[in-house]
Amino acid sequence: MTNDELLAMLQMEYPDAVPGKDYLIVVTYEDGVNQSAHARLWQWTHPTIPRPTDEFLNQKWADNHPKVREWKDGDYKRAERNRRLIAADALVERAIDKQDADAERAARTYRQALRDVPQQDGFPNSFEWPSAPK
């Protein structure tokens, strides 16, 4: 289990626990490049949730790793969608500044299509990014 996979699993299991504040994860590398063991909890300081045991986390991973990987992949895709939304906002603003109603309408349509990406069938594994207007 990688750092990102453990982080995703903890976020799924404990949505109120904040990474970097309520817990820290550690990963061991054998040669500075290749991970030599599963990522693990290094520190847990959540005030109301007891620290999950390594056995509990390993069992959760064994039972749910495909779902965890899909959740993690969805998180990456949503982050990419958010980057594209920032660029789409700029397209809308430029069209407004130029008083180009057609360009504004196209940019707004594109921006909405980006917002709808996570609702597409097959997200996050199989979906299509909308095309930006020219």
Image (spheres, rainbow, N blue to C red):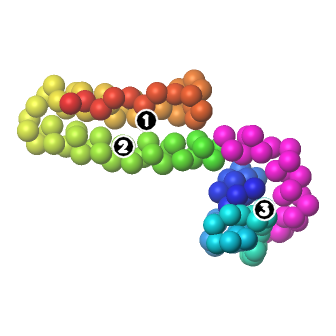
**In what element is the residue under mark 1?**
helix
Counting residues from the N terminus, which is met first, the one under dot 1 or under dot 2? 2
Is residue 70 rendered to the left or right of residue 121? Answer: right
Magenta stretch in the rendered image: 47-70
Quarter holding the N terminus? Answer: bottom right
The numbered dot on residue 83 is: none
Q: Are marks 1 and 2 in contact (CB under 8 Å)?
A: yes
**In what element is the residue under mark 2?**
helix
Identify the residue at horizontal 68%, vertical 63% (top origin). Answer: 34
Residue 38: horizontal and vertical position, in percent? Answer: 78, 62
Residue 104: horizontal and vertical position, in percent? Answer: 19, 32
Identify the residue at horizontal 36%, vertical 43% (top origin). Answer: 85
Identify the residue at horizontal 59%, vertical 33% (top origin). Answer: 125
Instruction: Name the residue beneath numbered marker 3.
Output: 38
Amino acid bearing label 1: Arg
Q: Are marks 1 and 3 in contact (CB under 8 Å)?
A: no
**Which residue is situated farthest in the right direction here?**
55
Disc 1 vs disc 3: which is toward the camera?
Answer: 3
**In what element is the residue under mark 3?**
loop
The answer, for residue 47, to whether it is visible in the render is no
Residue 95 is one of the magenta-drawn residues: no
**Which residue is situated farthest in the left direction here?**
98
Vertical placement of residue 78 versus 30, above or below? above
Residue 66: horizontal and vertical position, in percent? Answer: 75, 40
Identify the residue at horizontal 58%, vertical 42% (top origin). Answer: 74
Instruction: Name the residue beneath numbered marker 2.
Output: 85
Instruction: Name the residue beneath numbered marker 1.
Output: 115
